[in-house]
Image (cartoon, rainbow, N blue to C red):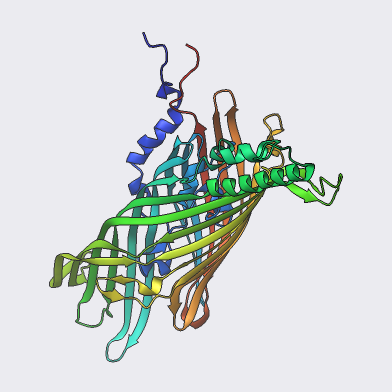
Amino acid sequence: MNFCKWNNLKSTPSILLLFIVFCFASSAMAQNTSSPYSRYGVGDVGAKGFGQNFSLGGTHIAMQNDSTSMFFINNGNPASYTNMRLVTAELGAKYNRITLQDATEKQTVNNASLGYISLAFPIKKWWGSSVGLIPFSSVGYKISDEEEVANVGTVNYLYQGTGGINQVYFGNGIKPFYGFPRMFFMSDKYAALKSLKKADNTLKTCKELFDDKEKIRKINNRKRLMQSAALGVNASYLFGNMETTRRSILPATLLSFNTRTGTNTRVDGLYFDYGFQMSYLIDSVKTKEKVDSCHPYRFRDLKENVKLLFGVTFATQTNLNATIDSLSYSYFNNSIGYEIVKDTIENTKGYKGNIAIPLSFGFGIGFKKGEKITVAADFAIQNWSAYSAFGQTQALRNTMRTSLGLQFIPDSKPNATYFKRTHYRIGIRYLQTALELKSTPLNEYAGSIGFGFPVGRSYILQSFSMVNIGVELGQRGTVSNGLIKENFIKATVGFTLNDRWFQKPKFD
């Protein structure tokens, strides 16, 4: 009888439940915006990252896990998967409250939706993977406009759009130089530097011993830097549909008919984004203290290690498959308000083409002091001026995003009080959007605050959970030149679950 068994997966019901939710999640993510500006391009493109990143102003490019829990999934940079040490699940819901304002009126709209669902797991110490479902873009608007037309009168135009694009991704990250420090310590070069004798079997002087010790330290630092280098890729399947409607309603006194044009655009295709990360650990600092002529200086160990973070993300231009169904007809409303179709103007089904998602690039830097303080910043651009749908451009401009985030944990020790173990987060961001309407650029500003509340820690079973709550306040657009300004409040509630799977017990 084999007494060495894998852990039963029934010990992780919370993460298994995640997969059940995954099967029904895509429809819940279809629309989570009520912005009139989502009628352009593929709609409002979703931000990268989950609950932790949301409260840090969306900062994610350089963010990575340490070797201690909590572990978070950073889908924005697939290179970060290499640092996973426990199976990690992320599940979150989002709420948006948007106040739309023009020169004369205000209107408030509320939306709630499933925000994200993801699972990440370590395969080797140098290899991690993640799979998830997230919204790629969202369309949701209802706009009315009036125009005085000569010899006709006041014509009302109604525009409406719903839907969006979902993203199912499978990502992998590897560290190609993992194990370099260990290989160095097992090498003949290390043995020669560590030895008290030189190659001719004579004893080294104290100065030579000190110099060799310094060579070992510098070589080890270089090897550790190379070991930290990580590469990653997310392979995604994008799918969804966007429905738009345009109505022209003529004055009732005319004998003409109203018109309605409705289109349904179905989208699907593969999309790839890539990432790179590297970190440098500083655990000691050089001092001016001189012991003797053989030791001209020494290194002092830091009370808390300092880690410098660096990351890059990149995605090439991708052409998605797209199919349009379009129906235009004239109609009138009868006495009880029902539409009565008069004539079909156009009926097109299955018209095929492509939608080009442009390339993007970003880089980020970060600073960590022990487990207490994490500061990170991002800069990213995307070439939306190259966007096209069915061969037609929309005169969009390139986007630029900058963000800055700070996370503070007073004390991460297991015996610390609850609120000292709580994660406190704050962030700010700026987005130069892809829109410039009526010669007016539309930009977005926002600030966020959030908390990570630990739940049910078990260090013996290696099981950790956290509830992530974040709120963001911001605005987009302006009331100048007849445009609309959006003041929004966005909130997210997410759950991060860490657990250990597939562990061989040492004892029966």
In the rendered view, tell whether residue 78 sits above or below residue 156: above
- Give the residue displayed 36% in from the left and 69% down from the top: 41
- Give the residue displayed 73% in from the left and 37% down from the top: 203
> Which of these two is toward me, 470 or 58?
58
Residue 264 appearing in the image: yes
- Give the residue displayed 38% in from the left and 59% down from the top: 138
In the rendered view, tell whether residue 163 sits above or below residue 414: below
Residue furthest to the bottom in view is: 150
Residue 339: quadrant of the picture: bottom left
In the rendered view, tell whether residue 2 sits above or below residue 419: above
As drawn, is 25 to the left or to the right of 225? left
Query: In the image, residue 295 lies at what x, y percent?
Result: 81, 45
Query: In the image, residue 143 lies at what x, y percent?
Result: 38, 70
Residue furthest to the top in view is: 1
Q: Quadrant location of the N terminus? A: top left
> Which of these two is toward me, 475 or 90?
90
Residue 105 appearing in the image: no
As drawn, is 331 to the left or to the right of 238? left
As drawn, is 281 to the left or to the right of 93? right
- Give the residue displayed 59% in from the left and 41% down from the top: 189
| Count of labels in the image | 0
> Which of these two is toward me, 126 or 235?
126
As drawn, is 191 to the left or to the right of 214? left
Query: In the image, residue 330 lies at what x, y percent?
Result: 18, 73
Query: In the image, residue 213 lies at what x, y percent?
Result: 70, 43
